[in-house]
């Protein structure tokens, strides 16, 4: 049954926007959430177009790739010199990478 | 003939005959870049010193005649999402504005081994998210054919570069038309190879399931020359294909007579600019003259290409961009941060542009508990249907021909108000990546003074045939030889 | 008043003993690395553009564990991205397995400590994933060392089939033992190579329901596992008894205060947004590969224990003790094969003096200066009465210190036991003569003096008196004195 796309039905409210923003650790303000809300909703709503298609038992494409079982032997390869790594590290403390205080969220 | 206008083939001939040196070619390219790019803004970084040093080494090779390839001594540049050791790699994003990778992408190693000379890094839509190069965090690139128009995206800088002869070739990257669309807008030949044909190791990922690095060149011959060097299995990339790499240059001369060319009817329905359609139809007539069998076929799920593409893009991109957190590299905003989460939030807030933010939020949305089946999983199932459409088509045809874009290059600022409008311009190019099939965009005319490109789409691992068809077409037409006059 | 029973499920994280990391060629030997951030590469530190490639050995080790746990090895495997943010997680996602893990639907038979009956604990799955970096909390910041990031991890998840902390301990101990037997994990909980997470709920005895459960993370010793589980069981029981509800949450264990501490309330429960890892094609595990791996399975602890009972006449407890470590069991079997003495005696020596020395000195069972043939020789000298037990203890010490054979030491130190009756008669006579008060004391009924006099016999013979002979002669002499 083809879906009628003339009227938008998807709603992504401000709380949802804030929730997904936090999932991807994006700091956004209340005002920004309000701007994103209709934009995100319109995009998802358009893509609801997919509901028109009967997929039934069709397997997802991630299982139908032709390549299989790519592995490597358990051999040790030379590592990257630490100074090369540290060149790009924004905050360091001697040999370590430094970050602000961590509260146990994981 | 100005040195910077030479194609790879032409330059190689002169280099081999010692009528020109790589140092001269490179110096000419750099000079031309510094003059012309002030108008086009295709480059984020120009690596003069490195280029001249590489040219010097190339000249040594050419002198000794040892290890000389078609690409030895040839100046080129790459889209700024490809990791280049020691050279700033930004993805045109603030979050990587000063990031200098400490390792080379595999394709860069292969090009260096072949002796090619890197002159710089190209502007793009931030993290490949866009179709016009207007989403770059730094500046927009301008189309050399009309500076008020976009070059297309997201490999806009690369296409504009090649069109304006700033470097003999470029490496772009195509996730959902990002090589072909700007190639079409800028009158350049661009190839999206079969997924896995070219290693992705070192390519800053957008959509791991779709991303493909490919050549952008003056013609099919040059395209074959570059593909020859970069294609092939890479032990660092588990998705790279084992299949042996054929001789693409030799393959160009094989005949195309008798090959069956399919016209997908869904690609010619309403919405195409008439000038674009006329050019494509004219090209089809040419193919007929060349002895190809033309037939109409159907790709019934075409209209679902966009949602399939974007839903999977949102999901994978949101995961791929999670590593940009201010801990190990890139922008790191810690002022006022009371804890590490503040650092994450602030860094990503300041480092990502609005389109990137929209897409990664949508990615979290479509993957989150309760929505996964309806969006991500559904898209993956319809993706299988898209793949089967192509498989069925390739049972009746050897290749398909279609417009690359429904319009020619639009004006800067024309589509930036509504993200959806921008997505819709990708309609003809988004189905190939989910199916993993290769596609070549080839100049085939002009409409209202702007270039028109056509796509040749083939089945899995048929880029040799696509290049052959493109080459045959370019032997009897001269659209690809036209050059823009870059002026304000 | 309702009685509640605990419902416990365990998740065990085991670092695999491969040479290189799970998805890259960096060395996995981070616990030996002297310097931080030296076992790193673009892949394991999550640099843009880097890509994972699966370590075949890790898969093989996972298959071994799956087989040892009686699991089905899934012919089609898929890796997945588990998405969350933390500074010790370089990519902002962990590559793990979700829908299609290496192994599923297994079980382990564990004996309850009381020795009565056994419990079958079902194993839901075992899957492969990568370890995170090491985070060190400081005052106002934290430091990160990426050496550990990317080390292969095998996660074994049980069903909530355990109904006592003892059962949980027995299960955890058995799994650890099996992992060590297979050579895939060091079993070192202190270093974090093996970690536990307990899922705890309680329910009225007799009911089959599953109530809200809590998750206690990062238990890094059996002691912590037991104490934390016991505390949590009690806490939840008290809540229900007072009419309250148990809130689903993740807890940490504060060993100092002896309490579980909330780490995350259910509002912040992670939405991991799992999806199949696009950088890693599906992995097929063929029947052949499974069977080839099965051939590599050693005799496992339970089977070995049962065999020791029937072959050597040991008790179940003795057999379990010996088979708790494969190296110990192998040592015992080797020693038996080279000895004339009864298995029980060899067992007593090994689990007694021998292990005491090993533990005191902190020696590694795999690298001992005393090979099984030397121990066998020593025990044979005792059962053959060449030396007595006291001397044997001295010889054993010397064997550990010098690595010499027991025979050589006995000869060099002249420790051969003296059983010569005529000589010992003289010694006994001397003792009686020198200690009339003690003799009188003994004859007066103080039996403990006898031991003292035996001690004198040992002293006078420099420990070489055959105790049995000496005892007999001393008794005889004393009785003679009584009858005088």
Image (cartoon, coloured by chain):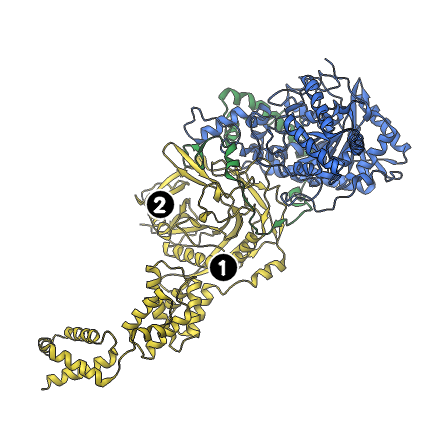
The correct choice, above or below, for C141 with respect to B143 in the image is below
Q: Identify the element where label 2 is drawn.
A: helix
Quarter-of-image position of residue C399: bottom left
Task: Tell me: B456 left or right of C72.
Answer: right
Residue sitting nearer the eye, C264 or C364:
C364
The C terminus of chain B sits in image quarter = top right
Q: In this figure, which residue is indicated by the disc labeled 1?
A: C182
What tint does the image give chain C?
yellow
Residue sitting nearer the eye, A51 or C477:
C477
* Chain letter of disc 2 in the image: C
Does residue C244 appear in this view? Answer: yes
Quarter-of-image position of residue B15: top right
> In the orientation shown, which residue stands out farthest toward the top?
B488
Disc 1 crowd, CA 10 A, few/some/many (<14, 14-19, 20+): many
Residue B454: x percent and y percent? 79, 29
What tint does the image give chain A?
green
Same chain for labels 1 and 2? Say yes or no: yes
Q: In this figure, which residue is indicated by the disc labeled 2?
A: C236
* Chain letter of disc 1 in the image: C
The correct choice, above or below, for B73 with respect to C24 in the image is above
Marks 1 and 2: which is nearer the front? 1
Tell me which label, 1 or 2, sits earlier in the chain. 1
Residue C439: x percent and y percent? 11, 78
Task: Tell me: A21 left or right of C260.
Answer: right
What tint does the image give chain B?
blue
Disc 2 crowd, CA 10 A, few/some/many (<14, 14-19, 20+): many
Q: Identify the element where label 1 is drawn.
A: helix
Q: How many marks?
A: 2
The N terminus of chain B sits in image quarter = top right
């Amino acid at each position: 049954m083809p879906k009628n796309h003339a009227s938008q039905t998807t709603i992504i409210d401000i709380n949802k926007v804030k929730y997904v923003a936090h999932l991807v650790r994006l700091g956004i303000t209340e005002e920004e959430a309000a701007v994103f809300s209709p934009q995100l909703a319109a995009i998802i709503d358009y893509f609801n177009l997919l509901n028109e298609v009967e997929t039934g038992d069709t397997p997802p494409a991630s299982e139908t790739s032709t390549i299989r079982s790519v592995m490597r032997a358990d051999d040790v390869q030379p590592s990257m010199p630490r100074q090369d790594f540290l060149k790009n590290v924004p905050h360091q403390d001697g040999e370590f990478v430094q970050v602000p205080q961590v509260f146990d969220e994981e | 003939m100005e040195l910077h206008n030479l194609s790879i083939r032409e330059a190689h001939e002169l280099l081999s005959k010692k009528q020109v040196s790589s140092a001269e070619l490179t110096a000419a390219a750099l000079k031309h870049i510094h003059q012309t790019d002030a108008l086009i803004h295709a480059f984020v970084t120009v690596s003069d010193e490195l280029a001249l040093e590489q040219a010097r080494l190339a000249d040594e090779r050419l002198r000794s005649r040892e290890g000389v390839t078609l690409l030895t001594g040839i100046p080129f540049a790459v889209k700024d999402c490809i990791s280049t050791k020691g050279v700033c790699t930004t993805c045109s994003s603030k979050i990587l504005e000063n990031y200098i990778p400490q390792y080379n992408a595999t394709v860069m190693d292969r090009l260096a081994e072949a002796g090619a000379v890197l002159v710089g890094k190209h502007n793009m839509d931030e993290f490949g998210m866009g179709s016009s190069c207007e989403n770059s965090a730094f500046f927009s690139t301008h189309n050399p054919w009309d500076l008020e128009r976009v070059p297309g995206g997201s490999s806009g800088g690369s296409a504009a570069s090649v069109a304006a002869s700033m470097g003999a070739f470029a490496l772009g990257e195509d996730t959902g038309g990002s090589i072909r669309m700007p190639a079409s807008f800028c009158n350049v030949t661009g190839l999206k190879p079969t997924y896995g044909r070219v290693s992705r190791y070192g390519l800053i990922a957008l959509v791991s399931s779709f991303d493909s690095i490919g050549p952008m060149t003056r013609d099919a011959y040059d395209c074959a020359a570059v593909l020859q060097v970069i294609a092939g299995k890479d032990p660092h990339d588990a998705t790279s294909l084992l299949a042996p790499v054929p001789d693409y240059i030799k393959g160009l001369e094989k005949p195309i007579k008798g090959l069956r060319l399919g016209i997908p009817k869904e690609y010619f329905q309403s919405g195409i600019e008439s000038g674009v359609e006329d050019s494509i139809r004219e090209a089809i007539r040419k193919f007929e003259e060349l002895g190809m069998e033309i037939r109409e076929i159907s790709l019934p799920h075409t209209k679902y290409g966009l949602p399939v593409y974007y839903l999977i893009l949102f999901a994978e991109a949101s995961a791929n961009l999670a590593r940009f957190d201010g801990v190990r590299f890139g922008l790191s905003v810690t002022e006022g941060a009371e804890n590490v989460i503040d650092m994450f939030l602030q860094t990503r807030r300041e480092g990502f542009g609005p389109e990137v933010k929209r897409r990664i939020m949508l990615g979290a949305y479509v993957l989150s508990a309760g929505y996964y089946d309806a969006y991500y999983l559904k898209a993956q199932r319809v993706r299988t249907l898209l793949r089967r459409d192509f498989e069925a088509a390739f049972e009746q045809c050897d290749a398909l021909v279609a417009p690359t874009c429904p319009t020619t290059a639009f004006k800067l600022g024309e589509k930036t108000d509504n993200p959806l409008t921008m997505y819709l311009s990708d309609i003809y190019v988004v189905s190939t990546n989910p199916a993993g099939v290769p596609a070549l965009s080839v100049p085939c005319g002009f409409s209202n003074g702007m270039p028109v490109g056509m796509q040749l789409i083939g089945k899995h691992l048929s880029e040799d045939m696509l290049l052959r068809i493109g080459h045959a077409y370019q032997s009897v037409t001269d659209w690809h030889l036209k050059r823009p006059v870059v002026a304000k | 008043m309702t009685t509640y029973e605990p419902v416990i499920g365990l998740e065990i994280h085991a670092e695999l003993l491969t040479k290189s990391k799970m998805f890259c060629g960096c060395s996995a030997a981070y616990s030996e690395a002297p310097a931080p951030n030296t076992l790193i590469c673009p892949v394991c530190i999550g640099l843009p553009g880097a890509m994972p490639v699966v370590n075949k050995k890790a898969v093989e080790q996972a298959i071994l564990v799956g087989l040892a746990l009686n699991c089905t090895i899934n012919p089609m495997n898929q890796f997945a991205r588990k998405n969350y943010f933390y500074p010790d997680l370089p990519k902002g996602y962990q590559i793990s397995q979700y829908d299609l893990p290496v192994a599923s639907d297994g079980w382990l038979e564990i004996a309850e400590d009381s020795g009565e009956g056994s419990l079958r604990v079902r194993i839901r799955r075992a899957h492969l994933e990568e370890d995170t970096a090491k985070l060190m909390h400081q005052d106002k910041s934290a430091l990160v060392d990426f050496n550990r990031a990317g080390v292969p991890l095998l996660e074994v998840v049980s069903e909530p089939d355990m109904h006592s902390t003892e059962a949980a301990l027995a299960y955890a101990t058995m799994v650890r033992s099996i992992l060590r037997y297979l050579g895939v994990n060091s079993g070192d909980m202190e270093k974090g190579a093996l970690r536990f997470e307990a899922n705890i709920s309680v329910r009225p005895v007799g009911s089959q329901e599953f109530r809200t459960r809590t998750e206690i993370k990062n238990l890094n010793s059996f002691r912590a596992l037991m104490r934390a589980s016991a505390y949590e069981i009690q806490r939840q029981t008290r809540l229900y008894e007072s009419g309250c509800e148990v809130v689903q949450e993740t807890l940490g264990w504060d060993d100092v205060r002896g309490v579980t501490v909330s780490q995350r309330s259910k509002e912040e429960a992670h939405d991991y947004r799992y999806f199949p890892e696009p950088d890693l094609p599906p992995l097929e595990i063929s029947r052949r590969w499974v069977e080839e791996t099965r051939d590599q399975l050693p005799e496992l602890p339970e089977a070995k224990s049962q065999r020791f009972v029937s072959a050597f006449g040991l008790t179940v407890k003795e057999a379990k003790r010996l088979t708790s470590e494969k190296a110990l069991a192998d040592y015992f079997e080797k020693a038996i094969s080279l000895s004339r003495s009864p298995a029980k005696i060899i067992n007593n020596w090994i689990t007694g003096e021998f292990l005491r020395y090993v533990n005191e000195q902190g020696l590694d069972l795999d690298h001992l200066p005393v090979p099984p043939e030397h121990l066998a020789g020593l025990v044979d000298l005792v059962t053959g009465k060449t030396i007595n037990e006291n001397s044997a203890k001295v010889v054993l010490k010397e064997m550990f210190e010098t690595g010499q054979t027991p025979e050589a030491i006995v000869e060099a130190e002249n420790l051969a036991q003296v059983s010569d009756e005529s000589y010992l008669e003289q010694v006994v006579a001397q003792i009686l003569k020198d200690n009339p008060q003690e003799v009188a004391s003994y004859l007066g009924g103080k039996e403990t003096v006898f031991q003292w006099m035996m001690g004198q016999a040992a002293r006078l013979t420099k420990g070489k008196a055959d105790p049995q002979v000496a005892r007999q002669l001393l008794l005889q002499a004393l009785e003679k004195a009584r009858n005088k």
